[in-house]
Image: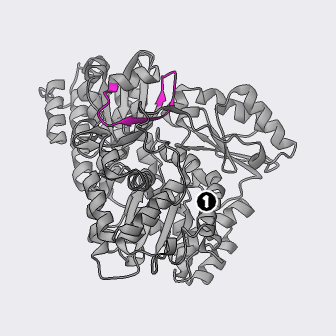
Amino acid sequence: MPYSLMEFFPHEPKQSKLLNKLREIQYTEGYISKEATQQLATEMELSLVEVEGVISFYHFLHTKPTAKYVIYLNNSMISEIKGYSRIREALERETGTRFGTSDRTNTFALFETPCIGMSDQEPAALVNFYPFTNLNIMKVRNIIQALKDGEDPAVMCDCPDDNIMYLPPEDKTIFFRPYTAGEALAKLEIRTPEDVIEFVKKSNLSGRGGAFFPTWIKWDSCRKQEATPNYIICNADEGEPGTFKDRVLLNREPGSVLEGMIIAGYATGAKFGVIYLRAEYFWLKKKLEDTINEFYSKGLLGKNIKGKKGFDFDIRIQMGAGSYVCGEETALLESMEGKRGEPRTKWYFPVERGYLQKPTIVNNVETFAAVARMIEMGINEYLNRGIPGSPGTKLISLSGDVDNPGIYEIEWGMSIEELLNLAGAADPYFIQVSGPSGESVSMHEKHRKISMRDLMATQDIRCGGSVMVFNKYREIIDILINFSDFFMKESCGICTPCRAGNYIVHKKLEKIKHGIATYSDLNDLHQWCDIMKTTSRCGLGKTACNPPVFAIEKFRDYFEPKLDTTFDGLNHKFDLEESVKEYEKYKS
């Protein structure tokens, strides 16, 4: 029986099964009871407190009964500008219940959630983890009535459109060119593992999850480790609001992602691969399983792949349970091991001690797809796209106040202005690049290039694929508060700078909104941002302050009238110019 039909690899310990067991109970029973928790603790040989700690960590696990139909409505900023409030009211009216509760008959339970990867089709919601997009009041009414009539949400749900709005000219697309399973793997017949790593080095490919660490260095370091077995992990936990490129790749070209993982296994000597799929993409799990089984049937997974003796590789899927911080690679590894998804202290890199303390490669969906396609097309063809220092193409998730939200595959080097023109941006004013943890861009910077040496090269930009556009009628402070609320709630809380700092920053932003903030509040905000950046354990805390820091520096004309200049609290001279100096210090 292929491993794809099994839940786990035979050698994995009991605790690694915990998260999937909890998800199964949640899905079938509607909640995880005290009795079920105790039974799992006994079965996994864990304490009750350990299991309860795992349950309390994840957003989609509940210890109290929910309902037959559990609805999660996205409350991200893009959803808010597309009609979130009206949809929230309609859901409460049609179900007869309030958010955070279930109705008297336990038919409907309503919850909010930060982002479900549908920013190009907002407002959107999940019903029992099946997506319903482009919601309006009438559509909500029809959906709820159909559910009351016994319709299955799995049957009546929307299959989200891919919304591929732009591909490079002259057939220069990389990710969406015609695909045939196994073509890239066939090229390995004449290449050694060292050849593959050298190939990736020449391509200048860097991690497409946002950290942009050179892929070849990670692979080469893992290959040189003495411990075995090695693991290849595909991070499909894109939880950054505004980002949905991985969703489209997994839905449209899942084979290229699998093939990239298999190539990574060949290059590093790894025999096992795991796709960590975010809970919000549960509806994609069946398609991935079918593709995995197809690969087994074609001899592209399993033993002696493509007839190459000793080239063995197996892949399974690990579902998440709702946690943005699990997108951080060490938190993801902890989650896979059946623990709370809290980032590890950085004593070792995952290539040294990763999953189960074994050498592990963690790359994201786009990175693996890029590897498969570049080997299939050849290095010269790949380098013929993009610009020097940033070869190839990049997938951009574009949403907000634009006529054409969706996926844009662009050659590196395209300017912000060109991208906005393609998208049909209406009065663009505030552009957030690389998600809430990224950089705020004003139209004074419209000529800046999307490249590794410009926009994507800014220090501590963690997510490399999102552009959210807001017009001049949107309140910047509301955008920042929404982002801050996201980080405050998604912080795992393990380190004090992030736990306390996000709360304090959120309160400072609220003071600005209500017109009672002083210049000294801006000073405090910068100081806390500096503390968070330098002392937080993972990228969430280090980058959570990017939005207010960038915004205050670049939109001074917006912020200055909102400050109370009659009293500065400390009676010292402090103005926005000094605030900008703090920003420059932060950036350097």
Q: Is residue 576 left or right of residue 267?
A: left
> Which quarter of the rendering shows the C terminus?
top left
Q: Is residue 30 visible?
A: yes
> In the displayed structure, would residue 463 be above or below residue 292?
above
First to last magenta residue range: 399-416
Residue tagged 1: 291
Label 1 Cα crowd, 10 Å radius (few <14 / some 14-19 / many 20+): some
Q: Is residue 575 left or right of residue 429?
A: left
Q: Is residue 429 magenta?
A: no
Question: Foreground residue, 256 or 527?
Answer: 256
User: In which quarter of the view is residue 89 placed?
Assistant: top right
Q: Position of residue 526 (x, y in %)?
A: 22, 38
Going 67% across and 66% down the picture, which residue do you hit?
24
Question: The residue under label 1 is which amino acid type?
Answer: Thr
Question: Foreground residue, 530 or 523?
Answer: 530
User: In which quarter of the view is residue 422 placed?
Assistant: top left
